[in-house]
Amino acid sequence: MSAQYGGPAGEASNYEYVTARVSARRASLFDEDDYRKLVRMGTGEIARFMEETEYGREMNALGARYSGVDLIEYALNRNLAKHFNDLLRWATGEAYDYIARYLRKFDAWNVKTALRGIYSEAGADAIRSDYIRAGEFDDDLLEQLAVADSVEAAIETLEQTIFADALREAYDDYEETNLLVPLENAVDRVFFEDIDEGLPSRVQADRATELYIEFITAEIDFSNVRNALRLARSGADMDPAAYFIDGGRLFDAEELRQLVGNRDQLVEHIRESIYGDDLAEALTELEESDDIVRFENVLDAALLAFADRLANRYPPSVCSVLSYILAKEREVDNIRAIARGREADLAPEEIETELVML
Amino acid sequence: MIPETLAPLFVVLQENVAAAPAIPEGDFQLGMAALAVGLAAFGAGYAERGIGAAAVGAVAEDDDMFGRGLILTVIPETLVILALVVVFLTL
């Protein structure tokens, strides 16, 4: 499949159709009861449970090749890709354009997967099975990436894509430090910079576009918050501006640099921003427990709740699709966390703290 | 949007009446009545467009939605029925 920009020009969006289908699928995602059941199962039981749900087809298709947690993980990825390709199949016009832009997230994911795989010499097979084929890259390109024998070769393979320039720039950094972080950051930044490229500004936009921009802005802001807190916590001597994603409205690069040095100020800054109410719970959690993983989970939940609220306020818009994409991703992350947690013999209570739930 | 595009039509119709009775009085009333039903049907059609698309989407996900989807889709037809009632009452 391939997601191209623009879609058929001038065609009207079919938000009603897409929203109805997406809402039905959103409603059939696992709920808290399912998760509560899952965290008490062994990996074999989880696999059986999933066979009876909507992951059945993928579980059966992959069952011959993989087993145990790997089977669950690959089935999850494949199911995710199937659903997101469905979204593109349904949507027309403007709606298609927005969804395709957002799904480029998975191009970024695939590039990062390939780079990490090559870096850690995991082998082409491992890379291939970790791909989520929901983005714009076609199978040929992904295949070439998987078999590339060095990071440099992989970057050359990406010559024709939007990631090329940023990756080439970041490559020197990578050679210096021998860390993947600069390259991964470059990929993330390209994705977020590209996502609102060419959209009308907030003032001129019609309601659907405005909501789309609002959602993207929130997502960028939340990523910045996450990065800032990680940096503040690690105390590493890195330039926060290098990790800053442009386009948010929470802070600019300069503010971020100052705030990373002082975590209390950073928390205070977020509390007073427009996201203060949404994140109040997360911030209190952070101040009390100082547990950044927990905070990030609450942050994810807050973003999901934000998307749901947008979708609720303006149903026939791209927001319901975005909220579905987020919710589906959360589900897949949660199931993966449960399966991996059970494999490592973690207690159910421990796993539950790792889950993102509304 | 619709009233604006149709406004010139009314003006033309009114002018016709005022200037010369090209259309006999009775026929004119009949014409306006037909227009009223037509506009109501257009409105119903426009409303059904969105509902129908959503209903087909819902049915595609879950077959049991067919009955409910069908009922919701035809609800705007009441617009046409009301227009017919008005036409019958006034003619």
Image (spheres, rainbow, N blue to C red):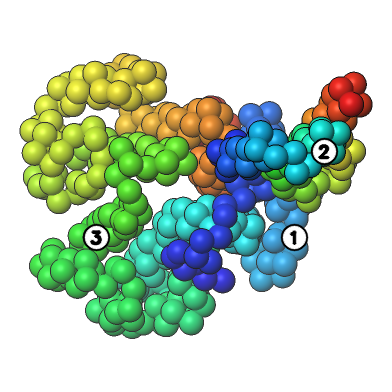
Q: Is residue A259 above or below residue A25?
A: above
Q: Residues within 10 Å of mark 3 (few under 14, many from 20)?
A: many
Looking at the picture, tell me which residue is in the foreground, A175 or A122.
A175
Any mark on residue A186, and which? 3
**Mark 3 or 1, which is nearer the eye?**
3
Three-letter amino acid code of the residue under disc 1: Arg
Q: Which residue is mark 2?
A: B24
Looking at the picture, tell me which residue is in the foreground, A166 or A355.
A166
For this orientation, the residue located farthest to the front is: B20
Q: Is residue B83 left or right of residue A196?
A: right
Numbered disc total:
3
Looking at the picture, tell me which residue is in the foreground, B76 or B40.
B40
Any mark on residue A57, and which? 1
Question: Quadrant of residue A275 in the image?
Answer: top left
Host chain of mark 1: A
Marks 1 and 2 share the same chain = no
Task: Report the residue at 70% width, 61% height from top.
Answer: A58
Q: Is residue B88 left or right of residue A273?
A: right
